[in-house]
Amino acid sequence: MRIGIIAGEVSGDILGAGLMQAIRRLCPEAQFEGIGGPCMLAEGFHSFFSMERLSVMGFIEPLGRLPELLRIKSTLETHFITKPPDVFVGIDSPGFNLRIEKVLHEHGIKTVHYVSPSVWAWGQKRIHKIAQAVDLVLALFPFETAIYEQHNVAVQFIGHPLADSIDIGADDPVQQLRTREALGLETGLRTIALMPGSRRDEINRLGPIFIETATRCLKVNPDLQFVIPCANPERRIQVEHLLAEQDAGANSKFHVLDGQSHQAMLAADLVLLASGTATLEAMLLKRPMVVCYRLSPLTFALASRMLKVPYVSLPNLLAGERLVPEFLQNEVTVENLTAELISLIGDDERRRSLAERFTRIHHDIRRDASQQAAIAVLCVAGYSMSGRI
């Protein structure tokens, strides 16, 4: 059993590794190749290119990398057409994966798209391209399936693997204190995690505002500390440069971590973060949050015209209401963020209420996602499940 997979970013790499593990439990002889990151490589994945070469976001930003992306696309298509896999799985990265899936599908190769493209957010035109490219869409959230069903596109809601891996009772105060101790934080101070993103451009746009907001919060409430997880050494250097520009006396209240974003959120009382998968993790950890969404001006101008939903953060989309504050583009100001953080940190009842709502949503999307995805992928490949489930 040969399975082609392309994962274009960190979240996709984690999903891919979980999928590989679950498939191997059902089909031990399965082999995997394509593009993957360190989590997939640790599972024995054969990657033809570094996953970082696909990690680019926005509408405008990919244009500067277009020749390289086209070369990668052509190489992969030629390989998979010449040596057809039993099934191909594109994990997220729809701008890249759907194009490859369409070509492979036209050559008779079974295709699955893992993580629904945001057709519910950007309108329905893309649904027709998806229908031409895939045999099955695996959706992580229940609100995503309706549009596919309306257009007779095969879809399956499988839940989210993060909801499976994070304990329902993740808001345990004892665990929070132990995590603070392990990270070298003061256990008695209110703690805020600052998470401006894992990409250079995200940190350029949000990092200075987040750190200035934290400094402003300290002037209002000195009994605070801040923890900043960095995705890699390059991002740490970026963050440390930003901190060096602040008042040296306040820097003792900032703790920079190598990775450990999960631990940073566990240690925190609340989180200030960029919109994305991290908002889901914060919700599953039952942490109140303030969500920011900031793109380059041209990209945001295009995106705002296309956006068809009232919210951008996953907690609000899953709840169907504005559970957590979110600030978009020009709303992302030090004044707005400071006011929201100070309000949240002092409102215990609001934080308890949020934790209750987050727990209900956690139950809704906890479905043993990797196992469900593995069964679905193998069924599309025509692999017999008899006696293996």
Image (spheres, grey):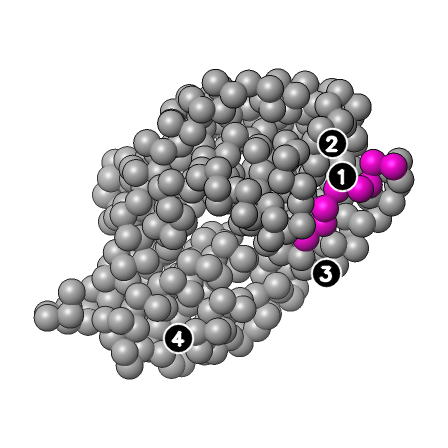
Residue at image point 47% right, 69% down: 40
Pinpoint residue 352: horizontal percent, then vertical percent: 45, 24
Q: Do residues under tags 4 and 2 come within 8 Å of each other at their CB atoms?
A: no
The quarter of the image holding the C terminus is bottom left
Q: Do residues under tags 1 and 4 come within 8 Å of each other at their CB atoms?
A: no
Q: Earlier in the sequence, mark 2 or mark 3?
A: 2
Residue at image point 38% right, 62% down: 18
Membership of 250 in magenta stretch: yes
From the viewer's perspective, tell me whether residue 60 is left or right of residue 386.
Answer: right
Quadrant of residue 385 within the rendered picture: bottom left
Frontmost of labels 4 and 3 is 3
Query: Could you tell me how far apart the alpha carbons at marks 2 and 3 are, in whole angstroms?
Result: 22 Å
Which residue is denoted by mark 3 in the rendering?
233
Q: Which residues are magenta?
A: 249-257
Mark 3, secondary structure of its residue: helix
From the viewer's perspective, tell me whether residue 60 is left or right of residue 276.
Answer: right
Which residue is denoted by mark 1 in the rendering?
253
Outermost residue on the left side: it is 387
Which residue is denoted by mark 2 in the rendering?
214
Frontmost of labels 2 and 1 is 1
Amino acid type indicated by mark 1 = Lys
Frontmost of labels 1 and 4 is 1
Quadrant of residue 248 within the rendered picture: top right
Q: Earlier in the sequence, mark 1 or mark 4?
A: 4
Amino acid type indicated by mark 4 = Phe
Q: Earlier in the sequence, mark 4 or mark 3?
A: 4
Which residue is denoted by mark 4 in the rendering?
32
Is the residue 173 above or below the residue 232 in the image?
A: above
Q: Nearer the viewer, residue 175 or 347?
A: 175
From the viewer's perspective, tell me whether residue 242 is left or right of residue 264.
Answer: right
